[in-house]
Amino acid sequence: MSRKNDQIPAEQLLRIVLDAIPLRVFWKDVDLNYLGANQKLLDDIGFKQLDDLIGQSDYAIYDTPEEAEPKRDDDREVMRTGQPKLDIEEPLPIPGKKLKWLRTNKVPMKTPSGEVIGILGTYQDITEEVEYRHLIERQALIDPLTGLANRRCLQTQILESKCEFGGLLFIDLDRFKQVNDSLGHSVGDNLLQLIASNFQEVADKHNALLARLGGDEFSIYKTFETASNIEDSLESIAQDVLNTLNKPIKLKNHVVTIGASVGIATILEASRSSQDSFAEADLAMYSAKLGGQNKYQFFTEELRISAHRQHKLYSCLQHALAQDEFYLMYQPQFDSNQNLIGTEALIRWKSAELGEVSPVEFIPIAEETGMIHEIGDWVIREALDSLQNWTALLANNPNFKLAINVSSSQFENKQLPLYIKGQLLIRSLNPGNLELEITESLLLDHKKSAVEAMEELKRIGVTIAIDDFGTGYSSLSYLATLPLNKLKIDRSFVTDLHNNSTNKKLVEAIVNLASGLDLNVIAEGVETLEEKSTLENLSCFSFQGYFFAKPLSLLEFEQSHNGFAGSCRA
């Protein structure tokens, strides 16, 4: 019995088979001219029938020889080597058609004797796969909120740049966190989008790349053909960035004011890594922020040295307590009759590696890293140990105050009152002899936990003083509501007070304010008789400063406290 397929000519049957295959199929002769193809391939390349393709080369399919030649190179290699070439991922740019992507396989066609007589190829349409992959790759390089390039994209651009010279700006928004926390993240996101749009105009103006690094941080990267005028150009970009933030920004029902701190790093060597540039620009930005908001700063070697110093300080500070490197100095406090009324305990650090380190350097690091809690507890213990030994002094002067500085972060620890009460109790000390000095920043934060700690300490008799009063930005209304006992007039108001009419008025106002709120007042940094006399005329009668005594070691203080009055200058 004959089969139905026996009635179909072999050539027609082959055509049916080829058109049924879910791949594009083609074959060429040794001159790289097409001998045949299936219908799917014809549809892709825009040929209506096979006869139109047979005898044609790839030059007839593609718009330019540059598009056709890579395909022909692959064909030549397959026929020259007699080896297949598989999984070639390549585009199919046909005029008037959407760009397709192919995964192509090519094998040599050989006679039984092994002679190569042409090439057979198949390809699969992988356009959706490639487009999805490209989408994922783009998303990995794009910030989703602003549509800007992200950090990874920017780093790639710097690494792949063929320009030897360039510049990188690191931009950190000032006061953004307050807006985000007070008005909500949706308003914060809208603000970032608006700022990004403004920054993009600056980047376009200077033919530079803008990126959002994350959070409220942006960066601008620009290349240069020569090294001349690079700093002037980067400075112009930085100034334009700051100018976009000069005016209040309207966001729906809100008006906000935002500034920025900008760090600038120049790139003068093609071999420099992007990490180096980012680190330098970041250091410069941090320096600009410390110098006051809405400023820009170029990276300098001095900043690198400073950063190295900071790192060394951090490293050494971690071991300072264990190595017993901290010690206390005591600066006495006096009344107008030069009677000793108290002393302030001042922490000092003599590092085995760095030598004497100023508190101005190490205290901010301790606060930033959280080490201030352990260090602060040590100060409290060490100072109270000294107070415990001053029995004769306390017997003769029951109102004597030992002042200890406590950071705002320490006050946020709910266990602080309990810790201080415990330390006083085990030494049988009167809480009334202890005074804690806080900074105005604590008043500005006005955190509930800190206020509760202050109230608890005042309840047991510990007094609370505001250190460096007048230099911060706290609301005066807090003075009436917080559990305070004393204001310390900052030395910046006291220096040369007798020759400064403005400072006289400020000190007089502080003294009157303190009197009206039933707060004591003491002036620090008193160094001359004229300053002391002027303060007395302004009704300030408690003092601390070099005119009376410099900070003393524990031994010096204990040996001389009974004779301070005779040693003071008159």
Image (cartoon, rainbow, N blue to C red):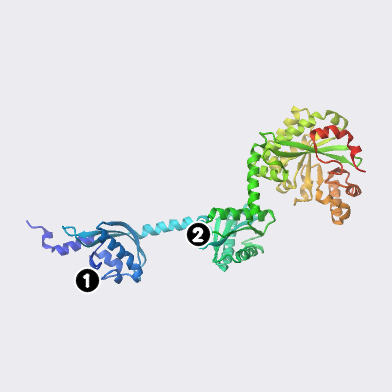
In the image, residue 202 lies at what x, y percent?
59, 66
Mark 2 residue type: Gln
The residue at the far right in this view is 570
Q: Which mark is residue 504?
A: none
Nearer the observer, 170 or 111 = 111
In the image, residue 324 lies at what x, y percent?
69, 33
Image vertical order of residue 461 relative to residue 221, above or below = above
Q: Where's the N terminus, which quadrant?
A: bottom left
User: Tag 1 or tag 2, which sits nearer the N-term?
Assistant: 1
Residue 226 lies in quadrant: bottom right
Distance in Å between CA atoms under marks 2 and 1? 48 Å
Circle 1: element type: helix
The residue shown at (27%, 64%) is: 40
Say few, some or many: other residues with alpha carbon within 10 Å of mark 2 (under 14 / 14 to 19 / 20 or more). Answer: some
In the image, residue 127 lies at what x, y percent?
36, 60
Mark 1 residue type: Asp
Residue 544 lies in quadrant: top right
Image vertical order of residue 209 relative to residue 333, above or below = below
Nearer the observer, 333 or 556 = 556
Q: Which residue is mark 2?
A: 157
Circle 2: element type: helix
Specify whether 446 is left or right of 204. Answer: right
The residue shown at (50%, 55%) is: 152
The residue at the far left in this view is 1
Say few, some or many: other residues with alpha carbon within 10 Å of mark 1 (under 14 / 14 to 19 / 20 or more). Answer: few
Q: Which residue is mark 1?
A: 51
Nearer the observer, 95 or 274 = 274
Specify whether 258 is left or right of 454. Answer: left
The residue shown at (58%, 64%) is: 227
